[in-house]
Amino acid sequence: MSWINETGPARDVVLSSRTRIARNVANIPFPSIMKPEHGEQVAQKIRSCFSSNTSLEEPRFNFMYMRDVPAVEQQILVERHLASQDLMENIKVSALLLDTKEKVTVMINEEDHIRMQCILPGLQLNQAWEVLSKVDDVIEEQVEYAFHEKLGYLTCCPTNVGTGLRSSVMMHLPALTMNKQMNVILQTISKIGLTARGIYGEGSEALGSIYQISNQITLGPSEDDIISNLTIACKQIIDKERFARKALYKTSGIQFDDAVWRSIGILQNARVLEIKEFMALISQIRLGVSLGLVSAFTLEKIDGLMTIGQPAGIVKKSGKSADASEIDIIRADVIRETMKEKILTKEG
């Protein structure tokens, strides 16, 4: 079961928590300048760490070269936040170790030689770091990392030097978006070394009022300090979002009900669904579920539907190849059928 299907702390606001660390192998050029034979050497070196490991009972990993993975499956990994788009851009030498529960991934030859991450449902940064630290130890037992005694772990991008740790919390913040408090929050968190990005990270939009809150600073503070700082900030944002939801519903209850049920009606009947409209409708329904306005839905089902509705998810679910002009029509068909079979019934 992945983070999409499971519940977790503060799931009404927090979809997932992720910890990710960047590492490079000593005495091998960074991926941006290395030769293909170096990439193969790194991939096999990291793969052997887990095939020969006996200390790590869980998770269990499957290894795959990205060049052997169909394009639609590559994008499914990106849409489920199990791999990055950058990994897919380096297709000739990139590889992935994916655990069977889809919580831990080790990306090989992305921007750095190693980008490992743990992603858990709800607000679980400390738990995610605990798991990831053990995975890091398994690799470090057999691999010498590029490390400087003053700078810490050396990375391709200077912004990751130090701990190499990037932690992020994916948050659904519709009420704060509606009452226009997000700009103030973004300015506030930037003063304590945090930043906010869209649903797919840097450069992406906050579709459906979904933001990724993460640390900007990796050099100086310890891993525990980074995670503690982000956790405290996210708890404050959670409180603000919950308060804003209650306040908006108190003043506009019937309008809330109407917006939620209109959104359900559109998804059940639309013949064309563009991604921005789809995400806005899902956001509205998710808000309604969190306020207890709709009993036929769960947050996990809504989040699963959100994932299915992404471009590659639609292609896989439908079993059809499609170009950009067709995808919105297929999305409407898939979402109608999925709502009928999996959401408004007791099955699934």
Image: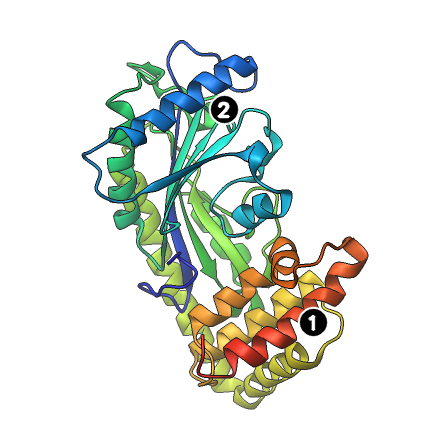
Disc 1 marks a residue whose amino acid type is Asp
Say above or below: 152 vs 80: above
Disc 2 marks a residue whose amino acid type is Cys
**Numbered badge on residue 298:** none
In the image, taking residue 130 as reference, residue 25 lies left or right, namely right
The residue tagged 2 is 157
| Residue toward you, 55 or 218 | 55
Say above or below: 26 vs 278: above
Give x and y (percent) for residue 149.
28, 14
- Point out the tag, 1 or 2, that comes first from the N-terminus: 2
For image coordinates 75% across by 67% down, the residue present is 329
Say above or below: 155 vs 102: above
Give x and y (percent) for residue 310.
61, 58
Q: Is residue 269 visible?
A: yes
Q: Dot 1, crowdedness within 10 Å: few (<14), some or many (≥20)? A: many
Say above or below: 260 vs 170: below
For image coordinates 56% across by 19% down, the residue present is 32
Residue at disc 1, secondary structure: helix
The residue tagged 1 is 333
Q: Nearer the viewer, mark 1 or mark 2?
A: 1
Give x and y (percent) for residue 348.
45, 74
Number of callouts: 2
